[in-house]
Image (cartoon, coloured by chain):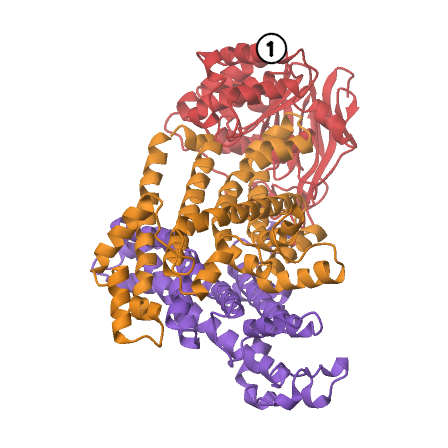
Chain colours: A purple, B red, C orange
């Protein structure tokens, strides 16, 4: 007498979607992440294919064609966004400027990422004195006024792409260290039991190959955020004249160059700043989006 | 329901919207309570006991839908009651004691502040009187050096002390109804009975009606006037405590009683019982007897309408008019 | 509590020493400070003379300890450019920067905290999304660009506010906005996250069960707990603002310490730069110390441990 069968509605299991379809759904639903990916992707393509996209050579000066307005303010199709004070095509400089920002941002983020992750993971994994030293170093780095020190170093060593990248790379590792440290601590607590059960002779490298996969998604998020940070800093340094040097096209530098004429030709200041804003916004959205999508507890 | 009832609940339903559909957490429960009476709601975790108490107090999240044919407190209809009505009731006439004393007190304010606030939120006779009452109640709940405790912070007290403070806080306005949701579950076994006895004694002393939610049948046997056995959102058996314990009719109730050793009832050396099976999914179509997935007397009829059987104040719902009592006794 | 403060103080002093050493040694980055000072056209003898005059021929550690000894007493040497004591130069500019900083953080708090609270009360609503968008956009906006736009709009087109100078309160409005907006996203997010967290805790449920009104629950019970980390964040942000003041002050021609920093760097005025780096970091250290103390004091659980 067992009238209980598998068709009984009380026994129906609730539908549990697979992990990958959950992830895909989250990504597709996250407008911020999608916007960020698309815009950053576009700008990366622009930067990569700059020589093919840019109508002119960004360094080519033509003093007879100085200060021409953009096409929507009465200019010619030859120079869609007009020319700057040295007759260089504005649009081309803008396009090549993407290279500068993205290159500096990326490399600086990678350098600081390597430094910060190494310090943070070491501190989180080994604890004790290593942790105390790293925490102290982080506090020292946090106490230093980044803009001021960066300006000073560039002033002493001379402004160039390499110097700016180096300075930013050596200064922006703090958030990496902090986040990697706490992530490592959390993972270590979690995996430690399993690791301890593994062969007692497990080398730290084995542990690292267990810890690293777990903190990689945090790492990616921080890389994007620090990349945005580096791009903004480079722009500020170049704006103040102590970053990338002319004639290299940097958006920050273009804003500085346009500053004196912004009353009559506001686009000189508006356009490069706007592009900067959009790029940094997209990177931030991407980073935030990645964090939302990969975090176990969503904002919702 | 008679006029004397302080609390009358008819056909209470609680629906929770989820990603996979509406979770019918509570489906049509009835109970009532007279002044000074103690009702124990018994059931396992997830049976809907806490939701019911929160629904009475109006403390459920706004997305959760509560509906009932009747939900009256002293003839005040709680169903559509305005926010200000509920606020005037909460703490003053209906008080609640929660399960987790460690986190139920605000860490940023002193015990005294929070106790006094409980009184000052409602018609009061001034701060001095509130303070005196706080001291008086702290002493009543067995906290020594009450006056100096007022300036202590929650983190300076143990779990047991914090729960005593919660009890005192619930009593600050002399409420007519206290709902205690598993007040001792999170405490050390050694002090559970102390706290419980304290709660019950104070309730009796002030003629306060009490709804005590618990999964501990031993407690129920000692303190309840009436019992309501809840399973997966339904009340499967209700009645005076003697009836429900000595003439338990629903298979689930009997199953619960088999699980715990009762002095004088359980034979020495006999095996403690278990209730096999899993808790059912309450999303979607939920009809028929909800216990059928774990009942040893299940029949095809259990998927349909389940009649209620009532004798006096004791009632239960089962297709079997005696809950298969005879055959169960034979196999025990 | 006292023990906690002393320990933090000791750590802070250690950090300050390290920063001072690093900032001092920056001078030697170029290899030869005497050569840098002398300029490109100087002869070997000139460079040597400068080296002896400024004491660059001595071992670095000796130079450092001399400088440090002076710094501790408030003597940072003489500016190469102004030929005046650095301490005095900085001192008079510091009030401008401090004023700006206080205005900026107050502005940030006044906007970000209420926004964060409202966003937490209505999560995923229109205003929540708006607040979050604002915070993401705020973090992406280059401050120098923002400043220039404000100048063009408010000082030139509308002529409501003066574009530069520091004579009246009006002069501070735009700089305050530009310096303050950058701190807003973090404050807003922390307030929002803290409130969301606190609002779901048991003691909030207890407060409601006692019959407290929503307003009371929000402000007396929830915010009081949620605001604790925000206070220390605000103090930390104030420390960061000093760096941001360099850009802001130069755009708006506010003659504060940040402006002086930029000028000194451009002029290779080493003593001033070194002193400023040290002072900026001291301020940051002090602010974070205050933040830690406030944090501990506001949370009774930390106060008595």
**Residue shown at the point (29%, 49%) measured from the top left:** C68
Question: Is residue A128 something one can see in this rendering?
Answer: yes
* Residue at screen point 79% across, 21% down: B75
The reply, left or right, for residue B306 in relation to residue A286 is right
**Does the rendering let one see residue B266?**
no
Q: How many marks?
A: 1
Q: Could you tell me residue A74's position as x and y percent?
A: 77, 83
Q: Is residue A263 left or right of residue A247?
A: right
**Residue C30: x, y in percent?**
32, 70
Q: Is residue A44 above or below residue A214?
A: below
Picture residue at 26% right of the left edge, 75% below the top: C44
Nearer the observer, A209 or C281: C281
In this view, the residue in front, C220 or A146, is: A146
Q: Could you say which quadrant of the image residue C129 lies in?
A: bottom right
Q: Is residue A62 above or below residue B117?
A: below
The percent position of residue C157, horizontal first and vertical second, equals 75, 62
Q: Picture coordinates of residue C72 (x, y %)?
A: 32, 44
Front position in the image: C222 or C165? C165
Question: Which residue is nearer to you in this view: C301 or B72?
Answer: C301
In the rendered structure, the answer to whether residue C71 lies left or right of residue C185 reads left
Could you tell whether A164 is left or right of B305 in the image?
left
Image quarter of residue A281: bottom right
Vertical arrangement, residue B322 with respect to residue C87, above or below: above
- Label 1 crowd (10 A; few <14 / some 14-19 / many >=20): few
Q: Chain of mark 1?
A: B
Task: Residue at 72% x, 34% y: name it.
Answer: B12
Which residue is identified by label 1?
B128
Secondary structure under tag 1 reads: helix
């Amino acid at each position: 007498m067992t009238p209980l069968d598998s068709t009984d509605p009380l026994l129906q299991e609730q539908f549990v979607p697979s992990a990958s379809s959950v992830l895909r759904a989250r990504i597709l639903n996250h407008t911020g992440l999608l916007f960020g990916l698309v815009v950053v992707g576009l700008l990366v393509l622009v930067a990569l294919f700059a020589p093919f996209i840019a109508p002119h050579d960004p360094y080519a000066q033509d003093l007879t064609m100085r200060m021409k307005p953009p096409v929507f303010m009465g200019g010619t199709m030859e120079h869609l966004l007009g020319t700057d004070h040295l007759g260089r095509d504005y649009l081309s400089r803008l396009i090549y400027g993407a290279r500068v920002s993205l290159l500096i941002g990326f490399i600086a983020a990678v350098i600081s990422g390597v430094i910060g992750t190494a310090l943070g993971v070491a501190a989180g994994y080994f604890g004790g004195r290593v942790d105390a030293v790293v925490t102290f170093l982080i506090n020292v780095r946090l106490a230093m006024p980044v803009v001021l020190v960066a300006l000073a170093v560039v002033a002493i060593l001379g402004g160039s792409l390499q110097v700016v990248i180096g300075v930013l790379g050596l200064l922006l590792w703090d958030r990496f260290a902090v986040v990697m440290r706490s992530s490592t601590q959390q993972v270590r607590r979690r995996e430690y039991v399993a690791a301890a059960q593994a062969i007692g002779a497990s080398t730290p490298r084995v542990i690292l190959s267990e810890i690293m996969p777990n903190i990689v998604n945090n790492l990616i998020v921080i890389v994007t955020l620090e990349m945005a940070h580096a791009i903004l800093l480079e722009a500020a340094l170049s704006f103040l004249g102590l970053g990338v040097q002319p004639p290299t096209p940097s958006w920050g530098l273009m804003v500085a160059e346009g500053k004196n004429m912004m009353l009559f030709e506001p686009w000189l200041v508006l356009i490069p700043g706007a592009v900067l804003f959009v790029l940094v916004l997209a990177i931030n959205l991407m980073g935030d989006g990645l964090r939302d999508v990969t975090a176990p507890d969503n904002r919702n | 329901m008679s006029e004397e009832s302080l609390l009358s609940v008819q056909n209470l339903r609680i629906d929770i919207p989820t990603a996979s559909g509406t979770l019918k957490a509570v489906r049509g429960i009835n109970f009532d309570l007279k002044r000074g009476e103690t009702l124990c709601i018994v059931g396992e975790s997830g049976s809907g006991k806490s939701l019911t108490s929160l629904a009475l107090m109006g403390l459920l999240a706004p997305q959760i839908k509560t509906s009932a044919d009747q939900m009256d407190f002293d003839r005040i209809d709680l169903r559509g009651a305005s926010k200000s009505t509920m606020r005037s009731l909460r703490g003053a006439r209906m008080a609640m004691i929660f399960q987790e004393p460690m986190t139920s007190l605000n860490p940023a304010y002193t015990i005294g502040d929070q106790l006094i606030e409980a009184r000052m939120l409602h018609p009061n006779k001034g701060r001095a009187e509130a303070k005196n009452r706080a001291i008086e109640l702290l002493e009543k709940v067995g906290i020594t050096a009450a006056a100096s405790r007022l300036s202590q912070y929650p983190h300076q007290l143990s779990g047991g002390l914090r729960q005593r403070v919660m009890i005192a806080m619930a009593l600050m306005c002399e409420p007519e109804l206290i709902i205690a949701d598993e007040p001792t579950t999170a405490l050390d076994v050694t002090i559970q009975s102390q706290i419980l006895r304290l709660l019950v004694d104070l309730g009796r002393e002030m003629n306060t009606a009490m709804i005590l939610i618990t999964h501990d049948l031993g407690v129920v046997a000692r303190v309840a006037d009436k019992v309501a056995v809840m399973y997966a959102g339904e009340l499967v058996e209700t009645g005076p405590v003697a009836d429900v314990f000595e003439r338990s009719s629903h298979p689930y109730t009997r199953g619960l009683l088999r699980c715990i050793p009762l002095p004088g009832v359980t034979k020495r050396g006999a095996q403690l019982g278990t209730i096999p099976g899993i808790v059912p999914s309450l999303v979607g179509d939920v009809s028929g007897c909800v216990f059928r997935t774990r009942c040893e007397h299940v029949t095809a009829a259990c998927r349909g309408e389940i009649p209620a059987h009532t004798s006096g104040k004791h009632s239960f719902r089962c297709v079997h008019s005696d809950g298969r009592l005879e055959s169960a006794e034979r196999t025990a | 509590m006292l023990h906690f403060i002393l320990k933090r103080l000791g750590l802070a002093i250690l950090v300050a020493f390290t920063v001072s050493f690093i900032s001092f040694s920056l001078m030697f980055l170029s290899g030869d400070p005497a050569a840098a000072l002398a300029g490109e056209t100087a002869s070997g003898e000139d460079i040597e003379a400068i080296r002896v005059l400024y004491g660059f021929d001595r071992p670095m550690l000796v130079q450092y300890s001399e400088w440090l000894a002076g710094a501790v007493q408030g003597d940072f040497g003489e500016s190469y450019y102004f030929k005046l004591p650095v301490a005095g130069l900085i001192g008079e500019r510091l009030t401008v920067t401090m004023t700006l900083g206080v205005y900026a953080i107050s502005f940030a708090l006044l906007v970000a905290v209420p926004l964060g609270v409202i966003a937490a009360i209505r999560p995923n609503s229109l205003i929540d999304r708006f607040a979050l968008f604002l915070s993401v956009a705020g973090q992406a906006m280059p401050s120098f660009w923002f400043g220039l736009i404000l100048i063009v709009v408010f000082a030139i087109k509308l002529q409501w506010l003066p574009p530069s100078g520091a004579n009246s309160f009006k002069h501070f409005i735009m700089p305050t906005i530009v310096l303050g907006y950058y701190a807003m996203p973090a404050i807003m997010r922390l307030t929002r996250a803290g409130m969301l967290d606190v609002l779901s805790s048991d003691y909030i449920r207890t407060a409601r069960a006692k019959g407290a009104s929503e307003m009371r629950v929000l402000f007396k019970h929830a915010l009081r707990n949620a605001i604790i980390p925000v206070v220390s964040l605000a103090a930390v942000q104030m420390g960061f603002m000093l760096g941001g003041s360099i850009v802001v002050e130069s755009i708006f021609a506010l003659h504060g310490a940040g402006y002086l920093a930029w000028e000194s760097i451009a002029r290779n005025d080493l003593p001033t730069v070194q002193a400023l780096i040290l002072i900026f970091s001291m301020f940051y250290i002090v602010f974070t110390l205050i933040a830690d103390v406030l944090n501990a004091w506001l949370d009774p659980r930390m106060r008595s441990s």
